[in-house]
Structures are given as structure tokens and as C-alpha cells.
Image (cartoon, rainbow, N blue to C red):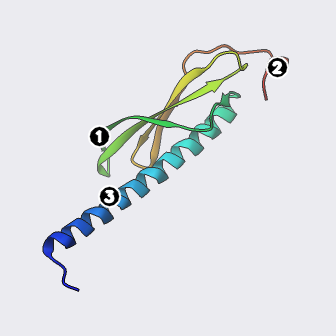
Amino acid sequence: MNLQLTDLLLLSALCIAAALFWRAQKIRESALLATRRYCQREDVMLLDETVALRRVRVRRDPGRGLCLLRCYSFEFTVTGGERYQGETRMLGPRVLSITLPPHRFSPEDQRLH
């Protein structure tokens, strides 16, 4: 088998792309887990059991250098009547913040869960 330099470069590029994709999936799973826990703690219901990547930016992380800031959105409800959209921000593998917009609170007997 005779490998050319272009073959090696292509193989290297594919390996790097696969590694980046795998890392992005791990960070997304971390964001989903943190969002689930936050929603349970705040007594709201996470809808669709998913987070969606909305934007990616490069930010400086003290002590780590440049990292990707990923903003994920998710939907939640309190009573089942309205959907609200929250945001989870990740800097590298670390959760920066999870925010919920102002939303209704329902009496204990009307909660879905």
C-alpha cells in the first residue's frame, strides 16, 4: 500500500473532525444533564428532554486560555399550558450559567409532576 501525503492529510483531517465532534457531543450531554438537574431543583418540567445549540463564540477562560462558549436553548413548562425558553451557557466543558425567563408559578395541586 502506497500512501501519498495528501492521503495522510485527509486521514488526519478526518480524525481531527471526529475528535471535535465527539467532544462537542460530550459537552452537549453535560449541558443536558446540568439543565435537567436545574429544572428539577427549580420545580419546572424540561420539555422534549433536549438542549439545542444556538451559538458558538470564542472566549477567554482565565487559566485555560481560549475556549468555545456554547449557548444551548431548551424549553420548559410549569403547568403544561405555556412553553418557556431557557438558556444554558457552557465555557469549554464547564457550565457558566443556566437562566430561566420570568414565568408563572402554579399552586402545588396544579403542577404536572
CA gap between label 3 and label 2 equals 48 Å
Disc with the residue nearer the chain's start (1 vs 3): 3
Pointer 1 residue: 59
CA gap between label 1 and label 3 equals 21 Å
Q: What x and y, as percent, mark residue 18?
A: 37, 60
Q: Is residue 6 above or below residue 31?
A: below
Q: The residue tagged with tag 2: helix, strand or loop?
A: helix
Question: In which quadrant of the rendered view does residue 22 lie?
Answer: bottom left
Of all residues, the one furthest to the left in this rendering is 5
Which residue is more in the foreground, 111 or 15? 15
Taking 75 as reference, is 5 left or right? left
Q: The residue tagged with tag 3: helix, strand or loop?
A: helix
User: Residue sitting at 53 percent across and 37 percent down?
Assistant: 51
Amino acid type, mark 1: Arg
Q: What x and y, as percent, mark residue 50?
A: 57, 38
Pointer 2 residue: 108
Disc with the residue nearer the chain's start (3 vs 2): 3
Amino acid type, mark 3: Ala
Taking 68 as reference, is 80 left or right? right
User: Residue sitting at 71 percent across and 20 percent down?
Assistant: 80
